[in-house]
Image (cartoon, grey):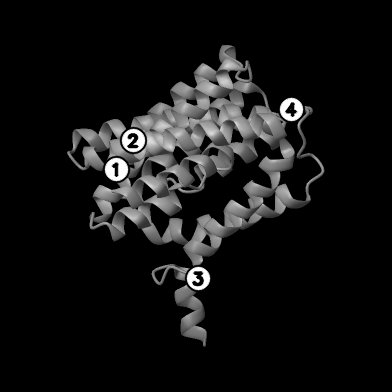
Amino acid sequence: MAALAAVSLVAGFVDSIAGGGGLVTVPALLLAGLDPAQAIATNKVQGTFAAASATYTFGRKGLIAWASAWRFALVAFASGIAGALCVRFLPRPVLDGLIPVLLIAIALFFAFSPSVRNEDAHARMGALAFGATVPVAVGFYDGIFGPGAGSFYMLAFVTLLGYGVVRATAHTKLLNLCSNLGSLFLYAATGAVVWPVGLLMAGASLLGAQIGSRLAMRHGARIIRPLLVAVSGLMALRLLLDPANPWRQGLAALF
């Protein structure tokens, strides 16, 4: 339990800035003896608390435009529920093959794009079109699987709405909170959540998220950009090293 709390503290810190904490906490839960369904469901508890902590901190500083963001949040919440409902029907190899490629693309974008900065830029998409696409797709994915969802939200806010990285991070945490919360409701209703473990991890991740979000607001792109690149790259590597990943299986068959 102490080890899981320590892991959650680190995951909450990373999640509040760049996302991807689930790729640390889910394996830790599996090593602790939970089955895969319990691990994914229980991880949603700490993920929800970490996102709520970061959202509160960013919101207090006026970095969330609530007039439009609440609509995105509602869509992400509903999409998270839909994703959790469909988790058993979507072919897992599709996700296993596609997600690492997208994460590598995100890492390259944030590493080399000159548009990644603290200041807002020109939006390439209206709020209505954004709300009808991004929270639907990413929220659905967050309900099904989750790791990398924060990176996908972040990329969309920066490239499509032109948000600076700090403002994009703030809105990412809000949408992460809502899609996590939607899927958590469904997992809790099925009895898959191990609440004593989840709540312990939630307390630790809440503290980590407070530290991370404050650092993000203080240092902006100087800390968000490199951490996002590193986390996206490591998430892609972690998924590609999984023996069940189709890319690894394909390379093994060739060599």
Q: Which residue is mark 4?
A: 123
Whether the residues at callouts 2 and 4 have beta carbons within 8 Å, the answer is no
Foreground pick, 212 / 194:
212
* Residue found at the far bottom of this picture: 255
Q: CA distance from mark 4 to mark 1?
A: 37 Å
Q: Position of residue 247 (x, y in %)?
A: 50, 70
Q: Which of the 4 quarters of the picture holds residue 154? A: top right
Crowd around label 2: few <14 · some 14–19 · many ≥20 (10 Å): many
Residue 79 in view in this figure: no
Label 2: element kind = helix
Q: Position of residue 10 (x, y in %)?
A: 48, 46
Q: CA distance from mark 3 to mark 2?
A: 28 Å
Q: Position of residue 169 (x, y in %)?
A: 61, 32
Using residue 49 as the reference point, say whether residue 118 is left or right of it.
right
- Amino acid on which disc 1 is placed: Thr
Nearer to us of marks 2 and 4 is 2
- Amino acid on which disc 3 is placed: Trp
* Residue found at the far top of this picture: 67
Whether the residues at callouts 3 and 4 have beta carbons within 8 Å, the answer is no
Q: Position of residue 143 (x, y in %)?
A: 38, 40
Mark 1 / mark 2, whichever is N-terminal: 1
Mark 4 / mark 1, whichever is N-terminal: 1
Foreground pick, 176 / 129:
176
Q: Which of the 4 quarters of the picture holds residue 170? A: top right
Q: Residue at x 54, y 23 (%)?
A: 57
Label 1: element kind = helix
Q: Which residue is mark 3?
A: 247
Q: CA distance from mark 2 to mark 4?
A: 30 Å
Nearer to us of marks 4 and 1 is 1
Whether the residues at callouts 1 and 2 have beta carbons within 8 Å, the answer is no
Q: Which residue is mark 1?
A: 42
